[in-house]
Image (cartoon, grey):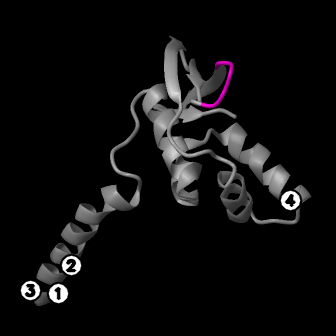
């Protein structure tokens, strides 16, 4: 009986902590994914970055890491250092089936840029 109660308490504690350790709630729209990705990059939260990146983006990053003799985690952390502070201004979000784009502009940038997204396993992922 004590083992069952202890296991139930441990499971409840893990479930209570899991959302905070996984970057909070799931990002439901490309705009939310973009903001979560940017915040994870600024914090060098490699685990969160991986969850927000498409399979294609992760494969590309792995190739870049190998070409630099780095692990994927080290590569992503090093790339995160280049993100300027503050989440960029977001503009129009355009969804077409399982693909989407989002216009964004950082406060110091002159031009708008476009981020691409793809829906994988029912969730939007940034497609770098």
- CA gap, disc 4 and disc 2: 41 Å
Residue range highlighted in magenta: 108-112
**Residue 121 visible in the snapshot:** no
Q: Reading the chain from its start, which is encountered first: label 1 or label 4?
A: 1
Q: Quadrant of the C terminus?
A: top right
Taking the image as shown, residue 91 lies to the left or right of residue 117, namely left
- CA gap, disc 3 and disc 4: 51 Å
Q: Is there a contact, CB below 8 Å, between mark 3 and mark 1? A: yes
Question: Compared with residue 41, is residue 103 higher up or lower down, i.e. above or below?
Answer: above
* Residue occupied by mark 3: 1
Residue at 58% from the left image edge and 58% from the top image edge: 46
Q: Nearer the viewer, residue 89 or 77?
A: 89
* Residue occupied by mark 4: 66
Question: Compared with residue 100, is residue 39 higher up or lower down, i.e. above or below?
Answer: below
SS of the residue at dot 2?
Answer: helix
Q: Nearer the viewer, residue 10 or 25?
A: 25
Q: Is there a contact, CB below 8 Å, between mark 2 and mark 3? A: no
Taking the image as shown, residue 22 lies to the left or right of residue 88, namely left
Q: Is there a contact, CB below 8 Å, between mark 1 and mark 4? A: no
Q: Reading the chain from its start, which is encountered first: label 3 or label 4?
A: 3
* Residue occupied by mark 2: 7
Q: Quadrant of the N terminus?
A: bottom left
Q: Position of residue 99 (x, y in %)?
A: 58, 19
Residue at 34% from the left image edge and 50% from the top image edge: 24
- CA gap, disc 3 and disc 1: 5 Å
Q: Is there a contact, CB below 8 Å, between mark 2 and mark 1? A: yes
Residue 75 magenta-highlighted: no
Q: Position of residue 83 (x, y in %)?
A: 64, 46
Q: Looking at the image, is mark 1 or mark 4 nearer the viewer? A: 4
* Residue occupied by mark 1: 3
């Amino acid at each position: 009986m004590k083992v069952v109660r202890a296991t139930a308490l441990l499971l409840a504690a893990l479930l209570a902590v899991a959302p905070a350790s996984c970057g909070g709630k799931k990002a439901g729209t490309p705009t939310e994914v973009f903001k979560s990705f940017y915040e994870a990059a600024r914090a060098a939260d490699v685990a969160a970055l991986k969850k927000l990146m498409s399979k294609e983006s992760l494969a590309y990053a792995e190739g870049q890491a190998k070409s630099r003799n780095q692990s994927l985690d080290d590569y992503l952390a090093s790339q995160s250092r280049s993100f300027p502070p503050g989440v960029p201004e977001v503009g129009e979000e355009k969804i077409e089936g399982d693909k989407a784009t989002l216009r964004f502009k950082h406060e110091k940038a002159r031009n708008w840029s476009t981020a691409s997204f793809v829906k994988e396993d029912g969730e939007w992922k940034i497609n770098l």
